[in-house]
């Protein structure tokens, strides 16, 4: 998306925007998380939107939105600053399901910018129902999405296909009990509930976990 040139529009990591979507006579709103653009153009904003064929809003975006159309978005939404968590936590856990991947992209990018080899551990676990749902394939790499570039570093990113999140699965990746740990969760409600409970079982308190929610 192109932002009007006279507008300064900075979206802090972990914040999102609300987008106005027309569906027939109705006007609806959905939250989306801008991802850092690969382009140097400060007037460009990238959104990565998963289309749900049975969804209420996204089929309208796919069908109705054409190149050159105008889109209304809100000011950035979000009340917390996460730089400290992203920069300093010794273990950072990112749990995403489906389109919940989007806020994790900039978090991971920022984490890498702060220091790739500083000994801190980072795990991005992406849960999807099928292989086709995964947004990190070769085609995506060609398209230049940052996540795809980062996905090459398989030590940090793990695609988990066809399994529901559980303490057992998380145990394989979260092991450092004696370090400062922080976690972010984004996904459907059921995923969020189980992810939070599992993290608690593994010793993370609710103060150490941020949930991206509508
Ligand atoms: C903070 C935040 C940031 C987000 N950022 C992004 C982003 O950057 N990119 C992105 O693609 N999405 C993002 N989302 C999700 C996005 O806001 C929409 O929810 C998404 O686009 C789906 O909208 P929809 O109206 O098309 O689908 P919906 O009508 O909400 O349905 C989505 C899917 O859920 C199923 N479903 C709906 N209700 C139920 C139910 N009760 N039980 C079981 N299944 C159900 C539907 O069948 C469908 O498959 C974000 C959400 C939040 C909270």
Image (cartoon, rainbow, N blue to C red):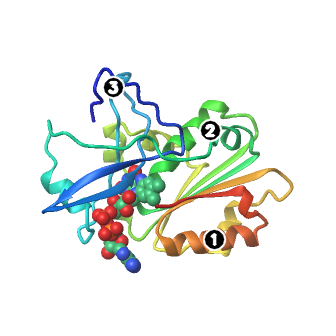
Please tell me which residue is depicted at 75% across the width and 53% down the height of the picture.
181
Spatial CA distance of label 3 from label 2 is 24 Å
Where residue 202 sits: x, y (%)?
76, 68
Left or right relative to 82: residue 67: left
Give the mark nearer the N terminus: 3 vs 1. 3
**Of tags 3 and 2, which is closer to the observer?**
3
Q: Report which residue position mark 2 lands on.
A: 111
Q: Secondary structure at mark 3?
A: loop
Q: Secondary structure at mark 2?
A: helix
Spatial CA distance of label 3 from label 1 is 41 Å
Give the mark nearer the N terminus: 3 vs 2. 3
Q: Label for residue 169?
A: 1
Closest to the observer: 148 or 209? Answer: 209
Where residue 2 sits: x, y (%)?
27, 31
Q: Report which residue position mark 3 lands on.
A: 43
Please tell me which residue is depicted at 25% across the width and 62% down the height of the picture.
57
């Amino acid at each position: 998306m192109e932002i009007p040139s006279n507008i300064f529009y900075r979206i802090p990591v972990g914040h999102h925007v609300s987008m106005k979507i027309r569906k027939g006579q109705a006007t609806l709103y959905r939250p989306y998380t801008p991802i850092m653009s690969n382009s140097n153009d400060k007037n460009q904003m990238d959104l990565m939107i998963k289309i749900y064929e049975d969804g209420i809003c996204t089929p309208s975006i796919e069908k109705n939105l054409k190149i050159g159309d105008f889109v209304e978005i809100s000011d950035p939404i979000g009340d917390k600053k996460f730089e400290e968590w992203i920069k300093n936590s010794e273990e950072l856990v990112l749990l995403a399901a489906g389109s919940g991947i989007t806020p994790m992209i900039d978090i991971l990018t920022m984490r890498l910018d702060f220091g790739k080899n500083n000994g801190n551990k980072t795990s991005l676990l992406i849960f999807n129902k099928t292989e086709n749902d995964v947004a990190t394939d070769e085609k995506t790499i060609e398209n230049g999405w940052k996540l795809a570039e980062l996905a090459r570093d398989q030590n940090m990113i793990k695609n988990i296909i066809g399994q529901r999140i559980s303490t057992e699965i998380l145990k394989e990746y979260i092991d450092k009990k004696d370090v400062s740990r922080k976690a972010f969760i984004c996904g459907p409600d059921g995923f969020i509930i189980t992810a939070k409970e599992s993290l608690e079982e593994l010793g993370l308190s609710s103060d150490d976990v941020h949930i991206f929610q509508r």
